[in-house]
Image (tube, rainbow, N blue to C red):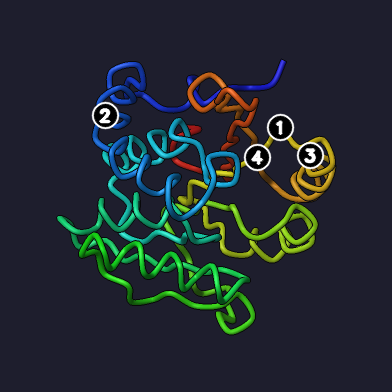
């Protein structure tokens, strides 16, 4: 049986998730009504999970890989804090649509770049990373590059861990390095069967 995030985070998701869902639901309905269909956008469950992580972990730097409603979540969180958000997408048109949605909600739109132009360096390390970039082929192919951005204190959240064609690529890379995977389905499963997973370095402070 896979390890779950319940085993690593001390804070209570049961208390935070309903409040986060309520906070985000109006914007989420707008987003899935005029920007992206509900089956293509991240789920409200995943969005609430990300919000609770931000509220409790208070990351100073966030890498948002795959623009969309996650960009709204992270930039809403950062709007009252000094956190730095970097949003990267492999589709210029989608990045533009995300920018328009953020602007409509008076959220900052700096540090939004295309994957090929982003040129992520091994020195570009982040406290929190959300990985929802492009299609599943792209995501599997670029996963080894992503792991170079995972420091010993990074919390990496992987979306769409229900995808059977994606799981082997993730498992292969995690076996090759010093990583631990934790299932977040308990808190992120939606009615489509989608859910998230969390990856930590084996040296992460949360595992001590």
Which dot marks residue 176?
none
Q: Is residue 89 left or right of residue 135?
A: left
First along the sequence among labels 2 and 3: 2
Q: Are marks 3 and 1 in contact (CB under 8 Å)?
A: no
Residue drawn at x 62%, y 59% is 133
Give 127 or 206, whichever is nearer the viewer: 127
Name which residue lies at 43% across and 45% down. Answer: 33
Query: Would residue 63 appear left or right of 78 to someone viewing this image?
Result: right
Q: Nearer the viewer, mark 4 or mark 3?
A: 4
Residue 97, percent from left and from top: 45, 67
User: Can you tell which quarter of the image residue 163 is in?
Assistant: top right
Which residue is the site of mark 4?
160
Instruction: State the CA–CA distance, disc 4 to disc 3.
Output: 9 Å
Name the residue carrying label 2.
Answer: 22
How far apart marks 2 and 4 lie (CA) works out to 23 Å
User: Sequence order check: which comes first, mark 2 or mark 4?
Assistant: 2
Upstream in the sequence, badge 4 or badge 3?
A: 4
Quarter of image, res 82: bottom left
Is mark 1 in CB contact (under 8 Å) with mark 4?
yes
Q: Are marks 4 and 3 in contact (CB under 8 Å)?
A: no
Of badges 3 and 1, nearer the viewer stands 1
Q: Earlier in the sequence, mark 3 or mark 1?
A: 1
């Amino acid at each position: 049986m896979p390890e779950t995030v319940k085993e690593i985070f001390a804070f209570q998701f049961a208390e935070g998730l309903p409040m986060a869902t309520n906070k985000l639901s109006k914007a989420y309905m707008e987003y899935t009504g005029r920007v992206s269909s509900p089956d293509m956008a991240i789920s409200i469950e995943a969005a609430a999970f990300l919000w609770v992580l931000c509220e409790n972990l208070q990351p100073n730097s966030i890498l948002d890989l795959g623009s969309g409603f996650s960009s709204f979540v992270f930039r809403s969180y950062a709007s009252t804090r000094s956190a730095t958000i970097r949003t990267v997408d492999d589709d210029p048109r989608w990045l533009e649509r995300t920018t328009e949605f953020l602007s409509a909600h008076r959220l900052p739109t700096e540090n939004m770049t295309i994957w090929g132009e982003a040129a992520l360096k091994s020195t570009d390390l982040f406290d929190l990373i959300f990985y929802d970039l492009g299609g599943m082929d792209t995501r599997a192919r670029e996963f080894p590059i992503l792991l170079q951005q995972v420091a010993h204190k990074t919390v990496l959240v992987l979306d769409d861990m229900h995808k059977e064609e994606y799981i082997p690529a993730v498992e292969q890379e995690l076996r090759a390095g010093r990583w631990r995977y934790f299932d977040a389905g308990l808190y992120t499963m939606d009615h489509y069967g989608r859910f998230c997973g969390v990856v930590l370095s084996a040296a992460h402070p949360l595992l001590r």
